[in-house]
Image: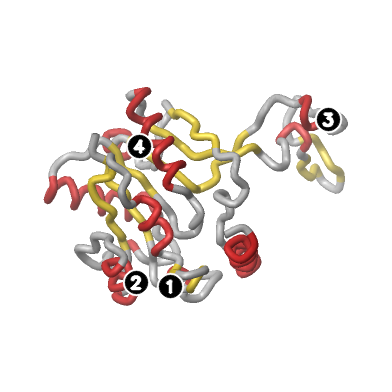
Amino acid sequence: MRILALVPARGNSQRISGKNLRQLGSKPLVVWPIDAAKDVPEVCDILVSTDDPRIADVARSAGALVPWLRPAALATDAALVIDAALHALNWYEDVHGPVDGLLLLQPTTPFTSRSTIHRGTNLFGAHKCQSVLGVSFAISHPMKCFTVDGVHLAPYLPKHEPHMRSQDLPPAYVVNGCFYLSAPAVIRANHALYGNNVIPLVIESRKETIDIDTEWDWQIAKWAVDQIG
């Protein structure tokens, strides 16, 4: 099985300036997913898609493949990750031949572990499935959530159980951003990182699911490195 690991890392960041080159613990943020994917037998290459020459240099030094700088049209604030992913996938298969899966690893979820990547790639191979998606238990259960109807709260779901104990509710999961693995045909057919036939990769580690989107998240990630290791 040949899986291409893709790390998307734009130079610009709306909410956190220079995010992908910021030092988190002992290394820049962009290096975390590169290191996690190293030595995974199924991963044939780790490709970093970036528009920033500085990120490209750091990624190459960490052992990643950076064959080009991402086109400017795919590096704007409005650009979609799926378009950058397809650009990288199409180039790689044209040059290096077909792959069985594209694995997206985001620098913004830096604590995705090598063991989690192993579990995900094993699920992908064992089930011969179209997609494996990293999920976590929902902190706020949808059956306890509300919307606002005019000036009043209203149940978000028709089946609403605001007073039921959380442990008595059916499990609910959310996509955590840690792991996206799909067959190229699925990505192209759906123009999405996963299709309809999805196997869940349940990640229980709260540290692994830290998603850095704001300065507050960055402080949490720094605390996790300092206090948890």
Q: Which quadrant holds the N terminus? A: top left
Mark 1 residue element: helix
CA separation, marks 4 and 1?
28 Å
Q: Earlier in the sequence, mark 4 or mark 1?
A: 1
Q: Which mark is residue 165?
A: 3
Image quadrant assignment for residue 70: bottom left
Residue type of the residue flagged with mark 1: Leu
Q: Earlier in the sequence, mark 1 or mark 2?
A: 1
Q: Whole-percent x and y of residue 9?
A: 38, 63
Q: Which residue is mark 1?
A: 21
Q: Which residue is mark 2?
A: 55
Residue in the foreground of this view, choosing between 29 and 171: 29
Front: mark 2 or 4: 2
Q: Whole-percent x and y of residue 192?
A: 39, 42
Labelled pair 1, 2 in contact (Cβ < 8 Å):
yes
| Circle 1 Cα neighbour tier, 10 Å, few/some/many (<14 / 14–19 / ≥20) | some
Q: Earlier in the sequence, mark 4 or mark 3?
A: 3
Q: For this view, does 137 lie left or right of residue 4?
A: right
CA separation, marks 2 and 4?
26 Å
| Circle 3 Cα neighbour tier, 10 Å, few/some/many (<14 / 14–19 / ≥20) | few
- Residue depicted at x 78% and y 35%: 144
Q: Whole-percent x and y of residue 213?
A: 56, 62
- Residue depicted at x 41% and y 42%: 117
CA separation, marks 1 and 2?
7 Å
Residue type of the residue flagged with mark 3: Arg
Mark 2 residue element: helix
